[in-house]
Amino acid sequence: MTTKEATFTYTLRLGDDALILGHRLSELCSKAPFIEEDLALTNIALDMIGRAQAMLSHAAELEGKGKTADDLAYRRPEINYYNHLITEQPNGDFAHTIVRQLYLSAFEFLFYCELEKSKDETLAAIAKKASKEVQYHWQHAMDWTIRLGDGTGESKRRMQIALYELWMYTGELFEMDAVDETLIKAGIAVDLTSLKTQWLNLIKNTVTEATLLMPDDTYMQSGSRKGIHSEHLGHILSELQYLQRAYPDAIW
Amino acid sequence: MHNEHSDSNFQSRIDKGEHIEARDYMPENYRKHLIRQMSQHAHSEVIGMQPEGNWITRAPSLRSKQILLAKIQDEGGHGLYLYSAAETLGISRQELIQSLHSGKAKYSNIFNYPALNWADIGAIGWLVDGAAIVNQVSLQRTSYGPYSRAMVRICKEESFHQRQGYEIMAKMMKGTKDQQAMAQDAMNRWWWPSLMMFGPHDTDSPRSSDAVKWRIKRETNDELRQKFIDKTIPQAELIGLKVPDDKIKLDEKTGHYKIGEINWEEFQRVVAGHGPCNKQRLDHHKLYFNQGAWVREAAEAYKQKHLKQEMQTI
Amino acid sequence: MNSDTQLDLWEVFIQSKSGQPYIHAGSIHASDMKMAMQNARDTYTRRGEGTSIWVVPSKYIVASNPDDNAMLFDPSNDKIYRHPTFYVMPEGAKNI
């Protein structure tokens, strides 16, 4: 595996995370608890899709096969998508949406601050933009977690369930394989080992302030780095890819 | 004591082109008319998120997905501006939404039609937003200050909506046979409902005269409709779309297009609740409103618990 | 218990560039200060309109009563000596 090949895979993974989470968040349009929150969630979705476009453009360039970001977003088979399992989980109720945002935005906040130092200049530039966006996503998720955890009995119960149910997808965020190792040596990728403790602290502090309980250690789901997904991804792709697959000659 | 609280003084202020502000004297019917019109307008923006929302997850490119999301978000924002403007008249957003759910308040008929293929997103932007903006530009000069200010902001933001819709239509008309067929199909289904958006003919519109007298409405239904027809037909022809009306004719003398007869029976039927999507649109709004109740209650409860703390930091 | 509301009404003021005045942009609903700030940002600065935001609960705005307009504003109409053009400068005076 050359550095370039590894960077391609690495960038593709980051692009897929943004693409699939952006897809899930965009499903919420016109479904938020009140209109201001609808606008807020859409802003986050737009940040994600913008980042997906930047990452996938870069990936297409690294691949060097003349493809575009859209080719990568819309024309791959399911097994070639590498987004984390947590990004493809259904929105569920508002508590699940917020907890998914809590886990992910805390991770991305730490991750993109680090990625700003990447020796791959394009990745560093995307990271610089993303870390500002993600800081806001984190603030939004944290505030809602505290509000809902310390709100009514019902909101507390729903948040606690969501914290437990999504916990098993958080282990995967810190997995690394040969791609990461090659690129860490080259100064391109982020070493996730050091992020884990920081992430856990961010989550713990927020969960405690929200008067909620941290989930117990549990078996952590895994597979996305190899393209093995939950059943949800197939349905996402059947919508995402519909027009591109049904009319392969069309330009949109 | 002067006659500041008289209807004649109010009318003379209107006639001088002054704006009326929330705390100024206004006749009760003026207030009622405004609440009805502004809430209908706000509900239209919010319900209007649904037909386009139907295509967000199937948008065919990353670019088009971002544009569509941003556009629908704008519509939510515009609903919000208008609810807020209506609230200055002493009615709460909660009450406005209740009237929508009870069927007392209406929204634009156009959103009771379905968005069936991707070209519908083009047609909605180009025709529906195109029709709306003709009306909205006129409303920037409406006599009620908060309404007028909301409309100024809305018009500024809406300017890209119609262009993105026309761009989709133009692209599809330049595309494959399938794409052209989709575009023409969308044109066929959205043309007439767009014309109906301006409401009944002036001769059949009972409330129009008061609204014009009070300068809530600055131009009549038929005047606005004609403006829309005149600018849209050449745009359709330019990209090779056929307007689904055999009777269209340009009157060389006036420079205006004449069109065939609008099917007012269909209009009345959809207003009465029998459009293809009336029930679906309202059910969607009620469903997510109800699903959000626990979140709003929790936010309220959190505030109650922490309000004292928050006030001390003010 | 029916405690469902659409949250509280807040007024939003946006400064478009540093040094410029804060101008009323519109209103939003929110239940607390943090939410008000975020909702104001998400609603009124989507197109790079702002460099700074003020939010204030609408109930704390005190507005003048239109009935008092004559009393409040008319008396200043004839105080023309508050305007520079009121004063006669000698022919040829510069930079004043």
Image (cartoon, rainbow, N blue to C red):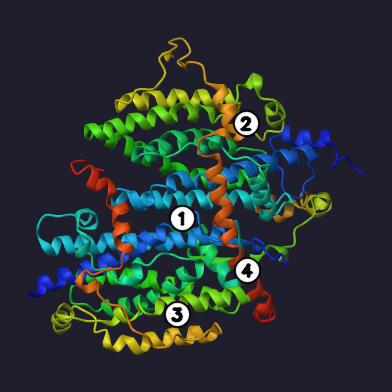
Cα–Cα span, label 1 and label 4: 21 Å
Front: mark 2 or 3: 3
Q: Secondary structure at mark 4?
A: loop
Foreground of the two, A178 or B11: A178
Cα–Cα span, label 4 and label 2: 37 Å
- Same chain under badges 4 and 3? The reply is no
**Which image quadrant for residue B310?**
bottom right
Q: Secondary structure at mark 2?
A: loop
Cα–Cα span, label 4 and label 3: 27 Å
Question: Which label was assigned to residue A29?
Answer: 1
Chain of the residue displaying label 4? C
Foreground of the two, C81 or A180: A180
Quadrant of the frame with the C terminus of chain A: top left
Q: Which residue is mark 2?
A: B218
Front: mark 2 or 1: 1
Q: Which residue is mark 3?
A: A164
Name the residue at the right extreme.
Answer: B1
Three-letter amino acid code at disc 3? Tyr
Q: Which residue is mark 4?
A: C31
Alpha-carbon neighbours of circle 4 within 10 Å: few (<14), some, or many (≥20)? many
Would you say residue C15 is visible in this rendering?
Answer: no
Q: Name the residue located 72 percent from the left edge and 32 percent from the top edge.
A: B15
- Same chain under badges 2 and 3? The reply is no
- Same chain under badges 2 and 1? The reply is no
Cα–Cα span, label 2 and label 3: 57 Å
Cα–Cα span, label 3 and label 1: 26 Å
Three-letter amino acid code at disc 1? Cys
